[in-house]
Each structure stands twice: as C-alpha cells, then as structure tokens.
Amino acid sequence: MNVILIAVISLGAIGLISAIVLYVCSKKFAVHEDARIAQVAEVLPQANCGGCGYPGCAGFAGACVKAADAGSLEGKLCPVGGAPVMEEVAAILGMEAVVTEPKVAVVRCNGTCENRPRTNVYDGAWNCAIANATAIGETSCAFGCLGCGDCVAACQFDAIHMNPETGLPEVDEEKCTACGSCVKACPRHIIELQPKGKKGRRMVVMCVNKDKGPVANKVCAVSCIACGKCAKVCEFDAITIEANLAYIAPQKCRLCRKCEEACPKNTIHAMNFPPRKPKVEVVPAEKPARVSNGNEPTKVEQ
C-alpha cells in the first residue's frame, strides 16, 4: 500500500513540476501576433496560390501589416482578390489602397501543328518538366511549347486549357488571376505575366526562340528571325532585339500596330483588337467632258 501511495505522490509531483515549467516557458517564449494579421487574413481569398510572392495568405497578411507599419502598401497585391480585396486590406490597416495595373498570363508561342511540324515521337512520361530535361520534344524547336499541359495542372482557377487542334495552351483571361502558377510550371518559360492593358489589348511577340534567324526559320514558319523591322518602325522605343529575339515592352507600347504590319513572319500578334477594316482602293474619278456653250471663240484656219 505504501508503495502505491509513494508512486502516486511521485507522479503527481512530476506532473506539477512539469506544468510549472511549461507555464513559465509559455510566458517567456510567447510570440505575440499582431491582431491585424488575423483581420487581414480573414478578407483574403485563402487561395494560398503564392502569386503575391509570399508563402500563402497568412504570409501575405503579415507582409501587409509590416508594410503598413513602414508607411506604404506599394508593391503589395493579391492577384486573386485584386483591387476590391486590397481596398479592404487598406481599410483595416488605415492606409490608402495603391492602384495596381492588373496582369494576365500570356503564352508566347504560336508554334501550332501547322506552323511547327512534328519531326519526333516522344514516348516518355507526359510531363513538360521531364520532356524538357530528357528530350527536345516532338518538334525541332528547342524553345517552344512541349504540349504536355503542366501549366494546366498547375492552375487552380481553371483558367488555362490545351487546345487539341493547335496543341498549345490558351488562357481564359476572364478567369486568370495572374497568380503565376503556370509561369512557374513551364520549364521553357514561354508563359509570362504582362499588364492586361486597356480593354485587354496588347502587342505580343509570339516567340521565344533565341536561335539565329536561319535556324529558327527552319523549325517554325512563324518564328522571330530578329530582322529588326519591327524595332525600326516603332516610334516609342518599345521594341528591343536581344539574343536573336524581339521583345515588346508593355509599359512603352502605344498599341499603334505598326510593328505587326512590318513583321515579315507574322510573329507579332495584336491581342483582343477588333478586326482591321479592309482597305478600300479609291479610284480617281474621270474628268467630265467639257461642253461648249456656243460663246467660246472658234479657231479659224488660215
């Protein structure tokens, strides 16, 4: 009986001491979280997509509070919630919402089955990352879309799909939140985030092939050959030629479409523009025959 009593008392004492130690540690090492972080996190969409550049919505909420303490929310944007959510975040933090231009994912490849013929047969795992690491793909272009759909699998918002006819991914701009998941998933970096533009209109070089002109022209009928004609006609210095590839800076482009007309390979696309009106040839009208009114002097032959 005494042995049982001693064991009970011993266990009770150990439990009491452990409780005291845990209590002291919890007080000494307690992390006090700013209440505003939970309030900001509550209005976020909780997509945890990472498009904001932080590890999930909780990380973004903490970054917003820290930025507010520093005096500005500039550079902070939830791509899923957009401007309405950022206005709520700003109101919670007592700040003014910073207007940020919305972005959208752009697929910079027009190597359809017609433009980029199939020259190989890929018989490996149907995954872009694996195909890129082990083979060139089913065409001779080492820069274009591989067509396995890693970007589709990465999108949480059903905003990108593979077109079975062209073999290329297409972005649904109404659903795209510019979270950047498809950008990270593409091993060949043919997808990038660009400003959505007024009425969704943009000028895009639909090629990322950095081979020299003759090589690029051989593997794809609409590849950029770095001829520089687009850069010459651009009056706004919006086009640069680097690494055998033209690129249009969205911030400088004024959507004049002169580069589209100048490109001999139809590599530059005008996105979401209305169709051009056909040019009407004006035929000069014939001058009407002069009619004599009888009062004009007549020439007398000598």
Image (cartoon, helix red, strand yellow):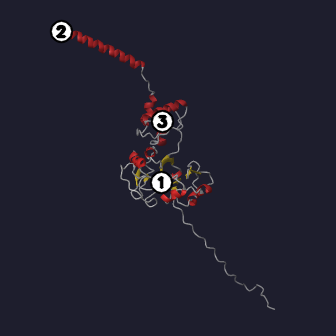
Categorize mark 2 by other alpha carbons within 10 Å: few (<14), some (14-19), many (20+). few
Seen as rendered, the residue at the extreme top is 2
Q: Nearer the viewer, residue 79 or 215?
A: 215
**Amino acid type for the residue under numbered disc 3:** Val
Seen as rendered, the residue at the extreme left is 1
**Amino acid type for the residue under numbered disc 2:** Met
Look at the numbered disc 2 and give the secondary structure of its residue.
loop
Question: Which mark lies nearer to you, 1 or 2?
Answer: 1
Where does residue 185 sit, x and y in percent of width and height? 43, 45
Where does residue 301 sit, x and y in percent of width and height? 79, 91
Residue shown at 36%/18% (left/top)? 22
Tell which circle, 1 or 3, labels the residue nearer the N-terminal end.
Answer: 3
Could you tell me which quadrant the N terminus lies in?
top left
Q: CA distance from mark 1 to mark 3?
A: 37 Å
Look at the numbered disc 3 and give the secondary structure of its residue.
helix
* Residue on which disc 1 sits: 109
Q: Nearer the viewer, residue 210 or 158?
A: 210
Where does residue 226 sit, x and y in percent of width and height? 56, 55
Question: Which mark lies nearer to you, 2 or 3?
Answer: 2
Q: CA distance from mark 1 to mark 2?
A: 84 Å
**Amino acid type for the residue under numbered disc 1:** Cys
Tell which circle, 1 or 2, labels the residue nearer the N-terminal end.
Answer: 2
Residue shown at 61%/73% (left/top)? 283
Q: CA distance from mark 2 to mark 3?
A: 65 Å
116 up-or-down from 66: above or below: below
Categorize mark 1 by other alpha carbons within 10 Å: few (<14), some (14-19), many (20+). many
Where does residue 88 sit, x and y in percent of width and height? 47, 37
* Residue on which disc 3 sits: 89
* Residue on which disc 2 sits: 1
Q: Nearer the viewer, residue 224 or 20?
A: 224
